[in-house]
Amino acid sequence: MNTCYPSGKKKGASNRNRMQTENIATVVKHTGSHYLLSGLPEWNLFPAVLRGKIRLKGSSATNPVAVGDRVIYEADSDAPTLENPAVIRGVQPRKNYVIRKSTNLSRQAHVIAANVDQAFIVVTLDFPEVKLPFLDRILVTCEVYNVRPVIVLNKMDLFGDGYSGQIEAFRRIYGGAGYDIAGVSALTGDGIGALREACKDKISLFSGVSGVGKSSLIKALDPSVDLKIGEISEAHLQGKHTTTFYEMYPLSSGGFIIDTPGIRGFGLVDVKPEEIALYFPEMLSASAGCRFTPCTHTHEPGCAVKAAVEDGSISYERYSSYLGMLEEGRKYR
């Protein structure tokens, strides 16, 4: 990867007799305490480090700086190097972000990415099988933090007539809840053109469990993107981790994508149990007809949400996910 460096207005002499500059750039890669920045929309990579502690107001995340953050940095020269990197001094307010806990027992949270235009959540019906409660947790998080989600159903080339019922049921559940679903195949290229067009001139997060073909999908979008592609573990039908860092890449067709390591656990962060139903769009719409306000949609008489589950207008699978989140939220408060 070619690396070039920014220039900025000279701001004053440092105590080491070097001229410092202060500027704003976007974090495009995070590896421990080291970062790569770029002055988007230009792709002009340069290294940076954190010195001292940066705390974001109201944040419980272990990483105060994430890929996609717009940061304020200082440089001792016009050309930061690995030996003399720029120094990140602060983070500009985020328009949105995606955050998770690895487990509900954990008190530590991690910001996956910030300031994205959309999140493509990559799943497959099999190899590995999509776990709906896991997918629902990601969707709720996107709703909470104002990120537009799109469900990408990958490996469609593997699913013949024998899977038609499963595909129809999946589309009924999530299309009925109001989510966009893109059926694609990284192998055959089906749906890739439309996905590439959807990424144009946007910052797009790609996320999912290991083995869903996320890296292959990104390579299909732009073969020039240098990603490692792994294989499925036959023993557990799970993918091997091939992406080890959170990293942004430019697309030759326009826009930027953020690739993430495969996710194995996704706990909700800072969502109160009584708020969870607000982030299920189909439940929020139906709840206007509930007899009581607030309504937990569990035991109250005259609950419009429970009635919608019974008549099939809200899927039992989504309602079951909601009950699981509600119980976990109460248990681990």
Image (spheres, helix red, strand yellow):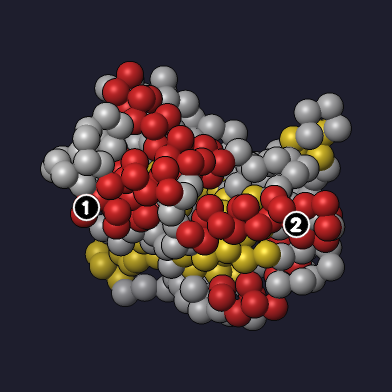
Image mark count: 2
Q: Is residue 82 visible?
A: no
Image quarter of the C terminus: top left
The picture places residue 113, in percent across and down from the top left corner, at 45, 52
Name the side, left or right, on which 58 lies relative to 194. left
The picture places residue 119, in percent across and down from the top left corner, at 50, 59
| Amino acid at circle 1 | Gly
Image quarter of the N terminus: bottom right
User: Which residue is labeled 1 in the image?
Assistant: 289
Q: Earlier in the sequence, mark 2 or mark 1?
A: 2
| Amino acid at circle 2 | Ser
- Label 1: how many Cα within 10 Å (few below 14, some 14–19, many 20+): some
Q: CA distance from mark 2 to mark 1?
A: 34 Å
Labelled pair 2, 1 in contact (Cβ < 8 Å)? no
User: Which residue is labeled 2 in the image?
Assistant: 164
Residue closest to the eye, 308 or 138? 308
